[in-house]
Image: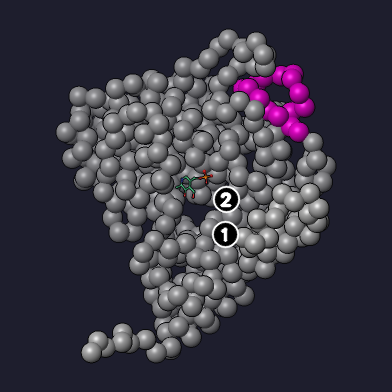
Amino acid sequence: MLDLAVAADLSREDIDVTAVLDHLVQDAAATAPTSIGYPGAVDLDHTAVMTRLGSRLWNNIGDPSDRGGVAHTRVLEQAVIAWVAELLAMPADDRWGYVTTGGTEGNLSALLAAYRRWPTARIFFSEAAHYSIPKIVGMLGAYQAVVRAHPDGEMDYDHLAELIRRRRRWPAIVVATAGTTMTEAVDDTSRIRAILAEHGMVGHLHVDAALSGIPLALDGKLRLDDAGGIGSIAISGHKFLGVPTPCGVVLIRDSVRNPAKQPIAYTNSVDTTVTGSRCGLAAALLWHAIATHGREGHRWRATEARRVAAYAVEKIRAAGWRAWRYPHAFTVVLPTPPEPVRARWLLATDGPVSHLICMPGITKGQIDALAADLTGAVRAPIPRPRSRR
Ligand SMILES: Cc1ncc(COP(=O)(O)O)c(C=O)c1O
């Protein structure tokens, strides 16, 4: 990264702009082979969109169904929403969604819609939920109930049942996670629904599927059909679809929303989204990723990435280190390696646990290099604390 000495001079008028940009690109390229801790796919080529559309403003301000206004890509945005909704088997007459700035905005948009409908609801989420969830609950000013998670990241349903039983006089908004941030655990929405039904609860079930939404839907394991009882879902666009700008998709059952109906005079658009101006380039990039690969292409990508993840577990174990993953997961969980390994590899670490994520584009060669470094770490003598005299 640009060091501070250089950064301090960045506003100088005689700055060499080309050198600064080159520096950024070189730094990113140099760290890319060892950046395997965060879930951005790196196998797709987005050059066609960046070259054709990347140098002007595309503003999808307002609702995706709006027309007119400045240059926009809402028609592509609608195609993206339709593709993801179809993949999730969402009923055509009861769906609405838009392209967001990321999973966080998707969670906010969905939970805002749910909370407007159920303003006395308690919001339940597990301690393995993404940090955006308690933040959003705080923004809404809602009451929260934090459900314990098992060490593998999945929600503790007995604890959920206990928390619901004690709060059954209020509606419940439950956030399930499909792909928790550290272990890629998937909360079981059937079990959550059974608990809600057992206690006769009304409310809303939201799924935060930032990473796993598309791959699980491609497997047929995540559905927003009538039987599933899921009211909304948030997905990140820069994770599995590897779009080179933060973005995402939110989908909400249309029947649970109470949207604004009057257009805003200044923009002549209906204000249904969290932000006003919205990135039309992101919608075009998402559409391009979908249109050029289709369901089969993306299924193949998911299968190949899971193969690399399985290979990573084997290689890391062969190196004398522990590792595990869920069968559906790209994420490989391991005890946090010692500092020399972490200094070289950008893993995500939460105390004693770390992970790497074998997103599409991560190669077996990268895994071999990590395993070699772990072998070295296993063999290296453990430094002894200096004895006090
Ligand atoms: C489970 C989960 N939800 C939400 C998010 C937030 O997504 P974004 O960074 O797209 O806002 C993440 C990001 O890592 C995540 O893992």
Instruction: State yes or no: discs 2 and 1 in contact (Cβ < 8 Å).
Output: yes
Question: In terms of secondary structure, where does tag 1 sit?
Answer: loop
Mark 1, ligand 1, within 8 Å: the answer is no
> Which residue is located at x 62 percent, y 60 percent?
4
Q: Which residue is mark 1?
A: 359
Q: Is residue 361 visible?
A: no
**Residue 290 position (above or below residue 17):** above
Residue interval drawn in magenta:
57-73
Q: Amino acid at mark 1?
A: Met
Queried whether the magenta region covers residue 307, the answer comes back as: no
Rendering quarter of residue 264: top right
Q: Is label 2 within 8 A of ligand 1 (CB to nearest ligand atom)?
A: yes
Does 261 sit left or right of 179 as displayed? right
Estimate the x, y position of residue 349 in percent, counting from the top left. 43, 63
Pick the residue in front: 281 or 360: 281
CA gap between label 2 and label 1 equals 8 Å
